[in-house]
Amino acid sequence: MSMQRGDLCLVTGVSGYLASWLGKYLIEEGFRVRGTVRSVKNDEQLDKMRELLPGAEFVEADLRSENGWDQAVKDVKWVFHVASPQAVKTESDRTGGATKGTEYVLKAALKSGTVKKIVVTSSVAAVAYGHPQSKLTYSEDDWTNVDVATYDYFRSKTLAEKLAWSIINDKTRNPHGVALSTVNPSMILGPSLVPWGRYSSETIKNTAEGKMPVVPDMVSYYVDVRDCARMHIAIMNDPKTDGHRHLSYNMKCQLIDLSRIIRDNYSHLGFSPKQRVLPKSLFWLLKFFSGDVRSLYSWIGTTPAYKTKYPNVYTYQHADLQQTVKDTIDSMLANKILLPRRK
């Protein structure tokens, strides 16, 4: 079964960076959208969302509470579970929020009687960490080893996705055979529809403002937020993706190259970040004292590669990393998340 114009889609955390783009594209393609927000009393936020997503419905539901989810999935056919505690300082108990939220959403969806398929936004954080340094290729078959990669964001994404698969594969909990697919994006960059920044934009902001004078010697992979959103719809609409995980990535560079891109394009605004690469020997020592460093260590000084098993699921439209970084910064400047240091 594929999606039909007029079908009702649920997008959890619709006011978020990725989810707002997803909601926009769904509406443009003729689907009805219901989005969850943490509070319907935030008038400023809801006014902005109504402007961005004309005709969308907004309901209150929180990942850490079972309240509201049955109403959220009422009459819904297609569930996009995007909401998850992010890797920002304001989030607490990321693992608890991610796993409880996943259970609440799936529980409500599976008993709704109308939901046909669920697409869960996971992450490469659930795929590529905590492995030996000798492992240089990652696919959808790989899972992060949370006994080694103890960084709480990695744990939250890994455990929440594993929980989703265990629920969907339990015939007593999923007697009607509702389908599940997951999307595992790399670092997401690109412009934001909403004037509030999240983890990805914070990384670019801190780099531009020189708050990250040193970086590890590591390669990093990226996907444009617009591609990632459209890929969610392509996966939802393709029955061949049922039961599969899907890596979402198409650009890469050394982490230090981000500062070069920013410096080359925005030095006239006072953004000329200078970074240096910390030697691997220092990270070897730090991994004995820091769980976060230990979580990343297998990527330090190596060149791992992602190799998706399903390359034909989606054709990326944004493949120029420099342009995507520029679109990211231009959006941050427009939203005053990033302020020029000189004109």
Image: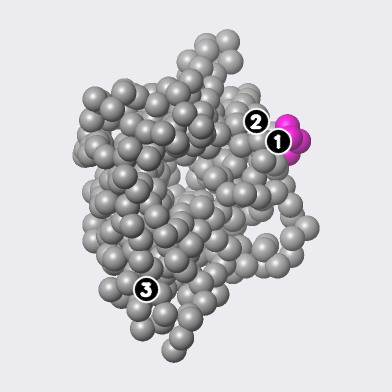
Q: Is residue 135 left or right of residue 294?
A: left
Residue for point 54% across, 70% down: 337
Residue 87 image point, x, y percent: 54, 45
The answer to whether residue 141 is visible is yes
Distance from the alpha carbon under mark 3 to that under mark 2: 39 Å
Residue 65 in the image: x percent, y percent?
Answer: 74, 35
Q: Nearer the viewer, residue 227 or 154?
A: 154
- Disc 3 marks a residue whose amino acid type is Ser
* Label ID, residue 96: 2
| The C terminus lies in quadrant | bottom left
Could you tell me the amino acid type at mark 1?
A: Arg
Q: Could you tell me if the residues under marks 1 and 2 are in contact, i.e. CB atoms within 8 Å? A: yes
Label 2 neighbour load within 10 Å: few <14, some 14-19, many 20+? some
The residue tagged 1 is 64
Q: CA distance from mark 3 to mark 1?
A: 41 Å
Q: Is residue 287 left or right of residue 218?
A: right
Span shown in magenta: 65-69
Label of residue 272 in the image: 3
Q: Residue at x 61, y 37 (%)?
A: 94
